Amino acid sequence: MTTITAPDTSAFEALDASLTGDVVVPESPEYDAARRVWNGEVDRRPAAIARCRGVADVMAAVRHARDHDLPASVRGGGHAVAGHAVLDDGLVIDLSGMTGARVDPVARTVQLEGGALNAHLDRETQAFGLAATGGFVSHTGAVGLTLGGGIGHLMRRLGLAVDAVRGADVVTADGTFVRASAEENPDLFWALRGGGGNFGVVTSLTMDLQPLGPQVLAGLVAWPAAQADAVLAFMRDFVADAPDELGLMANLRLAPPLPLFPPEVQGTPIIALVVTWSGDIEAGERFLRPLRAFGTPVADAITTKAYTAHQKMLDAAVPHGRHYYWKSHRLGPLTGEVIDVICTHLGSITSPMSSVPIFCFGGAMARVPEDATAFPHRDAAHDINIVASWLPEQAGESDRHRAWVRGFFDALAPHSRGVYVNFTSDDAQSRVREAYSPTQWDRLRAAKTVWDPTNFFDRNANIPPA
């Protein structure tokens, strides 16, 4: 493909005229806002942004890029830390205006448009007392999350987000529309469920829903960092035989200046366990007593609340526009050696906005056969994501924060069992192979060869054609 270095914006007038949406070019007043994504560290200047409103717009945008030898990216929620949604000097196919989430309460399904966020999914499904696994942050794109697998608070009870997918509407690399399901184009359907954005523009997903809530028993319990090693060992053992109704993650960071934490604790290293009990509330109260009584907590905020409120609990910690950098590992059970590495590097954290979430697997997601989808290592115990975060005005400190992430990541490397493809960052191209088993990798490359033989969709954790 040819990269346009001095784009002639008049070339996009015909595309603009053909869309229900519109085309934003560098001269447009809204250009700077339209090219921004969640990670403020990403600062790219597309030749144009096609803000699509439906499938016909997406088809037209793909064909325009192909006809004009333009590189293209696809934006859903724009939440990938690597900024895959935007590119320099190419066309952004922007689905962020396509946020519909249509629930069929009788069939217990939702049809979710390509730009819908977790917040849209949760709001519409919970209106009917239904849910599917969504991410841990409500402003994450739900479809992009799902295409990579989709971990979330409910994964131990309902499985991964990808396990609920029953069909997809897809615009392929030649600008045509196809349907993917177990009956139609099953090779594409399999590849979409874990293979990310490599195979086409997914304009909608159909997902199964399960009864849930609207109230859950959820929140966090926090301890000072001096107890972190004991808390992590407790978490490992507590979740190992826990019922599916328990969702659990750890989060290590400096205590934020919130009323939840005593003044003397704010700004000091802590470990918190974030709990989601999605079953009977009284049974949950009984089951969680040992967790809440463990050690000497400095905060306990577990309470009965709306599931939709709990889904937004972590939003304020990861707002749009802040600068982010992270690296991730999939891990087995937390050995003493792994726990020592984690606790040591918590002590050297470089920013009060950085954090280290550790997600607990098991339950329903672990009982799905490995070959059913393109999500690997379902028998792993945890994912750890080492997240550095700092303010835009602190850009001069980025090297220091990145170095903390890399040192932490390298220290855990001997214990790694691969990587969750949605958590790849600037290492996406070098680590994408680690995100899949050998059998899955070969199958994904075969599907890529059929559906995108020229690798048109390459702004992602890229799977090349065979």
Image (cartoon, rainbow, N blue to C red):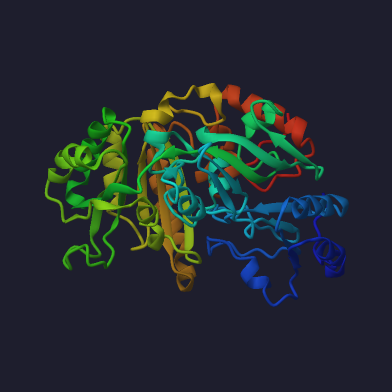
Image quadrant of residue 367?
top left
Is 9 on the left-hand or right-hand side of 55?
right
54 displayed left or right of 123: right
Residue depicted at 44% across the width and 43% down the height: 131
Spot occupied by residue 407 in the image (x, y as percentages of width and height): 40, 48
37 w.r.t. 121: above or below:
below
Residue at the spot x=62%, y=58% of the render? 96
Q: Does 85 appear above or below 164? A: below
Is residue 272 shown to the viewer in this render? yes
Quadrant assignment, res 278: top left
Q: Is residue 404 left or right of residue 267?
A: right
On the image, the x and y values in percent for residue 129 come to 41, 45
Outermost residue on the front side: it is 106
Residue 37: x and y in percent read 58, 62
Q: Position of residue 376 (x, y in %)?
A: 50, 29
Count of all numbered marks drawn on residues in the image: 0
Q: Report the side of 111 relative to 267 (left or right).
A: right
Q: Quick check: can you spot residue 274?
A: no
Between 311 and 112, the one nearer to me in the picture? 112
Please give the name of the residue rendered at 19% of the width and 41% of the height, measured from the top-left corner.
282
